[in-house]
Image (spheres, grey):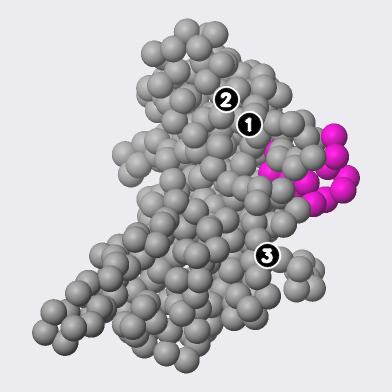
C-alpha cells in the first residue's frame, strides 16, 4: 500500500510539479536548513530551458540591488531601472528564486512585493513576462533562524512545507550527483541521520538539526555534500585533519561514526582485482564494508566492466546484490549501461523476487 500524505508536507519533486502546473501562483518553499530547497531552481531550469534564470539572495540585498532611479532629463522625471540580475531586460520569461525571502529586510521585501502579484506581476514599473515564474524559499518558524513574513505578504503566497528527504530519496539523488561512496554507504547504514527534529521521537538523535540545542554542525543533504568533497581528497590529509574537517561539516557524532566507513574503504579489494578476477577477489565481511563497495561500484561501472562485476556481486549476500541492482536501475547515467548488459539482464531474470 502506498504512503498517504494528508497535506502536511511535499517532497522537492512534488513542489516542482506544483510550481510547473500553476506558474502564475507564488509559492514559498519552507523547510529545515540544508534540505535542498534552493536546488529547485536548477530543477525548474532544466524543465524550462527557454527561460532565463535569476537567483536572488534576499537577505544580502539592499534597495540598490533591485532597482535604481535614473533621471530622464528630457521629460524631467525619474524612472527605476531594474538590476540586471533579474533578467527582465532580456524580454524572455524568467524563473526567479527569491532565496531566503523571509530573512530579508522589510524595505527589500516591500520593493520585491509587486513580483508576488498574480495579476500583472512586475519589478518596479516593468511587467514580468507572462510565462515568468517567481518562487520564494525560507525556513520553518520553529527552526529559530529569524524567518518572518507579514500578513499582507503571506496572503499573496502559498506556503509549501518541504519535507526532509528520506535516506532512500537522498541516495537516489546522491548516486547521480558524484557523492563519495563512503558517504552514501554511511547514510544507508544510518537512515536516522536523515530524520527530522519535527518528529518528537528524534529528540536524542545525535546527528540531526535540533533548534533548541547548541550545535556547530549537523547532518543535512547540504552538509553531506560538503563532507563528500572532503572525503574525496582524504589521501591529502592526515587523520587528525580529516576528522576535524569532517566534524566541522557534519558534527562530531556523525564524523566519528563515518570514520569507520573510511577504514572500510581502505580495507576493500582493489577495483582492478574485482574486475580481473571476479570469481576469486576478496569479499568484504561486514555490512559497512559491503555498503561502501556497492555504492563505489555504482560510480565505477561502465560497458566494459559491468559483466565481470555482476560475476563478483553474485557472490555477495542477496541484500547487497539487490542494493546494487536497484540503485543502478534508478540512475539515469548508469541504467542504460545496466539494461544493455546481458549479465545484468540475466541477474534480474533470475532474481525477480529480490526486487
Is 195 colored magenta in this rendering? yes
Seen as rendered, the residue at the extreme bottom is 119
Residue 191's tag is none
Badges 2 and 1: C-beta atoms under 8 Å apart?
yes
User: At 16% from the left edge and 87% from the top edge, which residue is drawn?
Assistant: 75
Q: Residues within 10 Å of mark 3 (few under 14, many from 20)?
A: many
Identity of the residue furthest to the right in this view: 201
| Quarter of the image where one finds residue 41 | bottom left
Report the quarter where the C terminus lies. bottom right
Q: CA distance from mark 2 to mark 3?
A: 28 Å
Segment tinted magenta in the rendering: 192-204
Residue 179 visible in this rendered orientation of the protein: yes
Above or below, 24 relative to 13: below
Q: In the structure shown, which secondary structural element does the residue marked by tag 2 occupy?
A: helix
Give the residue displayed 47% in from the left and 91% down from the top.
119
Task: Find disc 1 in the rendering and name its residue.
Answer: 217
For disc 2, the neighbor class at 10 Å (few under 14, some 14 to 19, many from 20) is some
Q: Which one is earlier in the sequence, the residue at label 2 or at label 1?
A: 1
- Residue 131: image location, x then y, percent: 37, 84
Give the residue pinned by disc 2.
Answer: 248
x, y percent for residue 352: 63, 55
User: Looking at the image, which residue is at 83% across and 42% down?
Assistant: 202
Give whichever of discs 2 and 3 has the lower sequence position: 3
Q: Residues within 10 Å of mark 1 (few under 14, many from 20)?
A: some
- For the residues labelled 2 and 3, say whether their Cβ atoms are less than 8 Å apart: no
Q: Where is mark 3, residue-wise?
A: 161
Amino acid at each position: 500500500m502506498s504512503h498517504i500524505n494528508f497535506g502536511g508536507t511535499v517532497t522537492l519533486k512534488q513542489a516542482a510539479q506544483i510550481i510547473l502546473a500553476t506558474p502564475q501562483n507564488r509559492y514559498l518553499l519552507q523547510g529545515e536548513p540544508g534540505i535542498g530547497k534552493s536546488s529547485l531552481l536548477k530543477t525548474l531550469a532544466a524543465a524550462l530551458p527557454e527561460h532565463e534564470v535569476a537567483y536572488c539572495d534576499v537577505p544580502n540585498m539592499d534597495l540598490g540591488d533591485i532597482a535604481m532611479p535614473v533621471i530622464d532629463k528630457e521629460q524631467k522625471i525619474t524612472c527605476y531601472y531594474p538590476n540586471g540580475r533579474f533578467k527582465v531586460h532580456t524580454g524572455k520569461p524568467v524563473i526567479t528564486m527569491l532565496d531566503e525571502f523571509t530573512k530579508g529586510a522589510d524595505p527589500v521585501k516591500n520593493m520585491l512585493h509587486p513580483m508576488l502579484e498574480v495579476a500583472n506581476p512586475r519589478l518596479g514599473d516593468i511587467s514580468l513576462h507572462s510565462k515568468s515564474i517567481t518562487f520564494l524559499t525560507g525556513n520553518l518558524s520553529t527552526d529559530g533562524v529569524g524567518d518572518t513574513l507579514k500578513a499582507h505578504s503571506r496572503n499573496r503566497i502559498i506556503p509549501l512545507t518541504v519535507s526532509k528527504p528520506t535516506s532512500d530519496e537522498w541516495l537516489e539523488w546522491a548516486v547521480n550527483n558524484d557523492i563519495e561512496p563512503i558517504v552514501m554507504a554511511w547514510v544507508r547504514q544510518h537512515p536516522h541521520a536523515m530524520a527530522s527534529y519535527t518528529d518528537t521521537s528524534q529528540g536524542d538523535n545525535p546527528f540531526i538539526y535540533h533548534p533548541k540545542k547548541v550545535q556547530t554542525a549537523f547532518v543535512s543533504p547540504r552538509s553531506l555534500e560538503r563532507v563528500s568533497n572532503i572525503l574525496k581528497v582524504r589521501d591529502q590529509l592526515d587523520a587528525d585533519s580529516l576528522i576535524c574537517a569532517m566534524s566541522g561539516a557534519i558534527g562530531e557524532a556523525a564524523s566519528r561514526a563515518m570514520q569507520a566507513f573510511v577504514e572500510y574503504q581502505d580495507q576493500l579489494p582493489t577495483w582492478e582485482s574485482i574486475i580481473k578476477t571476479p570469481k576469486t577477489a576478496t569479499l568484504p565481511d561486514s555490512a559497512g564494508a559491503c555498503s561502501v563497495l556497492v555504492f563505489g561500484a555504482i560510480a565505477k561501472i561502465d560497458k566494459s566492466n559491468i559483466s565481470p562485476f555482476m560475476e563478483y556481486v553474485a557472490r555477495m549476500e542477496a541484500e547487497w546484490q539487490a542494493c546494487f541492482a536497484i540503485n543502478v536501475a534508478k540512475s539515469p547515467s548508469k541504467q542504460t549501461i545496466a539494461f544493455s548488459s546481458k549479465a545484468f539482464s540475466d541477474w534480474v531474470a533470475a532474481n525477480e523476487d529480490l526486487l
